[in-house]
Image (tube, coloured by chain):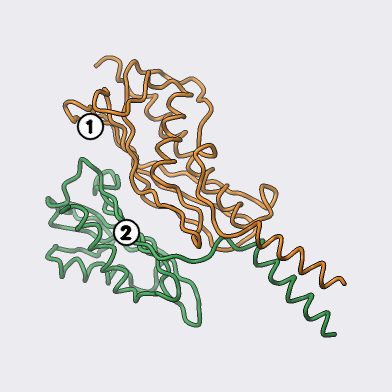
Amino acid sequence: MKNRYRIFMHLGLLFIIFLSSGCAVNRATATIDPATNLDDIRYIHVSKLETDNRGVEVLIANKLKQSGYIVDLGDNIPPEADAVITYKDKWVWDITMYMLELTLTVRDPETSFPLASGNSYHTSLSRKDPEEMVDEVISNIFKQEKE
Amino acid sequence: MIEKRLLCVLCVVTLLSGCASPASKDGMVIDSIANVQQHNKTVLIKTQGGKETGAADTPNISNNSFSAAIEESVINSGIFTQVIHGDNSDYILNVAIINMSKPLFGASFTVSMEAAWSLSDSVTKKMHWRESITSSHTATMGDSMMGVKRLRLAVEGAARENIRLGLMAISKLDLNSE
């Protein structure tokens, strides 16, 4: 009985190795289109991710407002918008649910072309609050512009 | 006895699988593109948004390998006459990896990727073309039993498709009249 239990344990480990895609890491990066000047942006529309029911779009809007931008959160992009922000968040469970990854993209409101993008990826042991993830990504995007 | 054998298999598999390996240039290169329109111009390739792959990471695409894969694909397809590594090119091709969605667990891994492609005149800085290109690729258990390798193949496949679509779009541009 004990041997059977051990065999099942080992098979379980083998199963995880075959199906899992990697281990863990922490990272924060940002890129900006060389022809783009983010200093020209004053009015930003934050486009809510359809599958987001955690209010990440509100966190993004609040951070942008704190940074001095005029921010819009509606369904439609207003004609005066200088840029649209889209995002993708990935949440996983480890004792509690936490935000593993957040990618923000600053887009041209007319063409949706990505003008700048930032990404933060923090695994369980160094997990950050969603507010901190949003703060890190936005700071990295606009810091990149000033460098 | 069975338990010891199983343990041996487990050790070997664990050692062989390790963690992630980065996407390789060779896995992202396009061999050829059908019906390509060749431009009698030279190009400088710049990439952004790539990430190095840490020892305990999922497979990523580095800027160097992505740039090398685009360069080799440009040469293989003959879209431009030459890829320049200096200041004397006719055009600058900027490609930024914007987003890459990778699954963490599963039998089939589908990776989707968005990259921002732009082509500008290296002298006048005039923007000739820019487009957001999205692509995806699915790697199954048939491609590899090992999860980390299967994910790397999916990442490489998504990047390869992105390069193919990007070069096809450039092929359709009217550059030779300028």
Q: Name the spot of residue A1 as percent of width and height, x first.
A: 85, 85
Q: Residue at x 35, y 42 (%)?
A: B132
Q: Residue at x 54, y 52 (%)?
A: B21
User: The chain shown in orange is which?
Assistant: B
Q: Quick check: A50 above or below B43?
A: below
Q: Residue at x 27, y 14 (%)?
A: B177
Pick whichever, A6 or A93, lies toward us: A6
Check the image and name the residue furthest to the right: B1
Pick whichever, B15 or B140, lies toward us: B15
Q: Name the spot of residue A26 as percent of width and height, x first.
A: 40, 65
Check the image and name the residue furthest to the bottom: A1
Kind of residue at disc 2? Leu
Q: Residue at x 34, y 24 (%)?
A: B173
Q: Which residue is mark 1?
A: B127
In three-dimensional space, the C-alpha distance between marks 1 and 2, rounded to whole angstroms, equals 24 Å
Quadrant in the picture for residue B176: top left
Mark 2, secondary structure of its residue: strand
The answer to whether B76 appears left or right of B143 in the picture is left
Question: What is the display colour for chain A?
Answer: green
Q: Quick check: B104 above or below B132?
A: below
Q: Chain of mark 2?
A: A
Q: Name the spot of residue A22 as percent of width and height, x first.
A: 55, 61
Kind of residue at disc 1? Met
Q: Which residue is mark 2?
A: A104
